[in-house]
Image (cartoon, coloured by chain):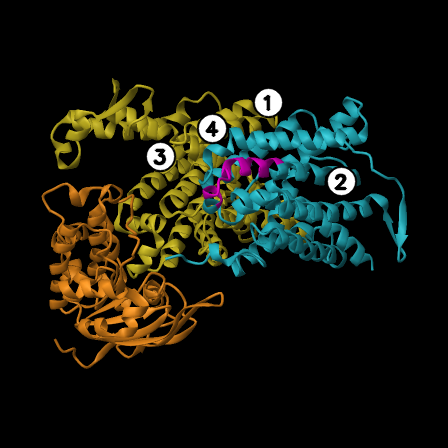
Amino acid sequence: MQILIYGTINSVALALFALGFALVYGVSRLPNFAHGALYVLGGFITWTFVNSLGLNYLVSIILALVANGIIGALIYQFVLIRIRGMEISEIIASYAMGLAILEGLRWGGFKGMTYMLPAFIEGSTEIAGVPVDYQRLLVVGIGAAVVTILWLFTHYTRVGLALRGVAQDERAAMMLGIDSDRMALAAMGFGSMLAAMAAIVLLPLGSIVVEAGYNVLILAIAVCIVGGLGSWMGAVLAAFIIGFAQILTVVYLGAHYQMVVALSAIIITLILRPSGLFGRQKELEERV
Amino acid sequence: MSAPSTPILQVNQVTKTFGGISALNEVSFDLHAGEILGIIGPNGSGKTTLINGITGFIELTAGEVFFRGEKISGKPAHKIADMGVTRTFQIMRPYYSLPAYKNLVIPLFSPRAKRTGGWRGGGKLGDRNTVSIDILEELGFERESFVPYKKASNLPTGYLKRMELARCLALNPEIIICDEVFSGLSMSEIASMVPLVERLQMEGITLIMIEHRLRELFRVANRIMVLNFGEKLIEGTAEEVMADEKVKEAYFGSEAVEEVMDHA
Amino acid sequence: MKESTGQRRKERLDRGIKVRSEGLYALMSWRELSYLFFPRLVLIGGILILPLVVPSMYWQRVISIVCIYALLALSFDFLAHYVGLVSLGGAFFIGTGGYLAAILNTSFGLPPLLTIPIATLLGAFICTLLLFPCLPLRGVYFAIVTLMYPLLLARVIEALDILGGTDGILGIESFANRWVEQYFIILIVLFFLFGTRRLVNQDIGLVFRAVKDNDQSVRASGISITYYKTIAVFISSAIGCLAGAYLVHLYMWAGLSTFALDFSILPIAATVIGGAGTLVGPVLGAFILVPISELLRAFGTLRIVFYALILLAFIIFRSEGIMVYGQRKYHQFEKWIKV
């Protein structure tokens, strides 16, 4: 029972990490290696709004989401747009960007255990005899809400449909008058917002540390690779697979293995089935 | 011309489906040593898929291909090329960053060329750069000009099409499967390619030619096979094929046939 | 070769001496010979003299580290720009080579003279074996796999607490003296620099470049791309493992930090800055970037920010790199002409 509850929570957390990455890659074929950095940045921005500026928690959350979205969009507009289509450069540039953000934060003194976000609701309850605090339940609730909103957004709004159009066939979308660069910009913006969202929901469970940026990036990549790069629903399912696998290994083998699971998931998936569990095979099939 | 009796290549009931849609449906044919087989059919009728299937560039869903009695379906593409069944690509695939003559050093470096000597045994004798320029000259690249030394990215389509053929020749092939070598060429370029194809046949190379340029194809091909929607419609001489009602209806529309027959 | 800016455009012409010194005619006069050999001599001479002119032992150590990064950058450049496999696995190679050398030295008591060659070959073998199933992958996928391997190995060593666990392997023998230490790696860098340069212009090198350019065409030529990719990965990982084996003897310690991402990212930065696809460029890039990074050591992690930003700037604004720029200036005139 404990495994089931904590597995679910962990899985939802993973899905939250990964959705932003999956969204950006899905729309613009851009592996955003700055994703982890944007996650940590989102956390620190919120913290700054709450603690340094003394704003209301809810207001600072909204402001932080917007700010992070704008930062993501700016990164796209001024850096990534110039090298789109060059895969190596995309990886290197976005990673360098992430590195600069994370190490810049570290240099700026954002380290140690002092940086914590308050929980939304304090206290805990018991489900089937397992103690769970409200914040963790909230994670599941918000995670489900985010997935639902994202689904509704991409299926029923103009922008969302345009995003999906670009994701499915960039050229056809361009012929229909959808500006693929603007859509990629929007995707980066929404992607960073999702990163901030994940940070705001999850960080109250611990403290904000720069190192988390690297781990979040790896986890997001793991989820997206296993689910199939570019497949959003695949990412959600993969989050559950990896999430439960992680909890199981932690319970039966020890906490050290948590990252080993994610890393080996990446490598094994890429070796056995590079398109992931739910990815579109088309891209990888030899086109002669 | 009567075709010799021993089939060099046997294609048996070849089928390929892409996610439920069948691109090839139980296509069978025999290819005899020394002949030229033309394959025609409307766009999307599975011609290129057939080539990809025979040469191992895609995996066949069902069916078998035999080369000189040995099963080649299921082997990797480079093994099939190594046995002498070579192909050109419809969309040319030169090594754009290398000069034209260096493009041919690569097939000359292949195990087959090393073993058999490559084009007319030249691979064993001279150094590969010289041999590749010999091949290019054979195909109409002027040796004394700058053309063979230009980067492939700077060459016009006509030369690139010939380079596709040159790559096959460098391997000292038994079969060349040409995927639309005439398309995209000017009339004069085609006129210079036709004798080349005939010369290859005289040297004992068996050819399969996929073409949309029917007039030129009918001039060189011994037999014609028609594909439509992944199925083989008919196989026979140019006249037989053109006379067939199914072909007329399914493919050409009657006027086009008459026009072609007038010229043929 | 032309850039247009408004109504003017830049015209570039080859220098006469470049044209004259192409082909056999280069042997005609000393002037032309020196035109060809001067840059090479400056490079070789410069690198050889460098340890003698630097002010302190600290900087000699820096030169050794520069050489390690130069080897990694060379290995990256060769694999990415001549074979088309983007490997972010510098740390993977360093870690494998390093741990192997450490084990050979501490457990079997072999001297560095033996551990380095064995670790190089064995390490390259192991790396190639692990990367072999990933060879059909392209672009992002191969890059991600190579990026993840070192992280995975580090976590596995940590989790299983083998090979010294988080403490690493201590007490590794160092070199006989600092001159051996210094010139060994310098000669290795020069050897591999000119070795790979020669290799890529051989026929086999052409096949590598063909695999990058158009792998389908290579398959149609009856050549197994997997075979040649394997060879290329072996060469590349051998260079990386050699650097790793040297590194642990230099530090007399092999730990989890040999799998650190620094070894993956800095060589790439060096390649981008130096000039991708030139092989010399990455080595030069390492000679520029690593000392700068050392100078900024006092600023802590700010130096990482700094080189990440340099890298970004180069990728975006000067993606050709220093070396290509320099070659162009050396070989060509430029002038503005009115359109």
- The kind of secondary structure the magenta stretch mainly shows is helix
**What SS does tag 3 mark?**
helix
Foreground label between 4 and 2: 2
Residue C123: where, in percent of width, then height?
Answer: 48, 52
- Tell me the crowding category of disc 4: few under 14, some 14 to 19, or many 20 or more residues within 10 angstroms, Cα based: many
The magenta region covers A173-189
- Tell me the crowding category of disc 2: few under 14, some 14 to 19, or many 20 or more residues within 10 angstroms, Cα based: many
- The cyan-tinted chain is A
- Tell me the crowding category of disc 1: few under 14, some 14 to 19, or many 20 or more residues within 10 angstroms, Cα based: few
Foreground label between 1 and 4: 4
**What SS does tag 4 mark?**
helix
| Residue under label 2 | A201
- Residue at the image point whose x is 22% and y is 61% from the top: B171
User: On what subunit does the disc labeled 4 rest?
Assistant: C
Type of amino acid under label 2: Val
The image quarter containing residue B154 is top left
- The yellow-tinted chain is C
Between the residue at mark 3 and the residue at mark 1, the CA separation in whole angstroms equals: 30 Å
| Residue under label 3 | C280
| Residue under label 1 | C298
Give the vertical position of C187 relative to C221 (above or below). Answer: above
Residue C1 magenta-highlighted:
no
Between the residue at mark 3 and the residue at mark 4, the CA separation in whole angstroms equals: 14 Å
Type of amino acid under label 4: Leu
- Chain B: its colour in the image is orange
Q: Is residue A195 left or right of residue B75?
A: right
- Tell me the crowding category of disc 3: few under 14, some 14 to 19, or many 20 or more residues within 10 angstroms, Cα based: many
Residue C185: where, in percent of width, then height?
Answer: 42, 37
Q: Are marks 2 and 1 in contact (CB under 8 Å)?
A: no
| Residue under label 4 | C289
**What SS does tag 2 mark?**
helix
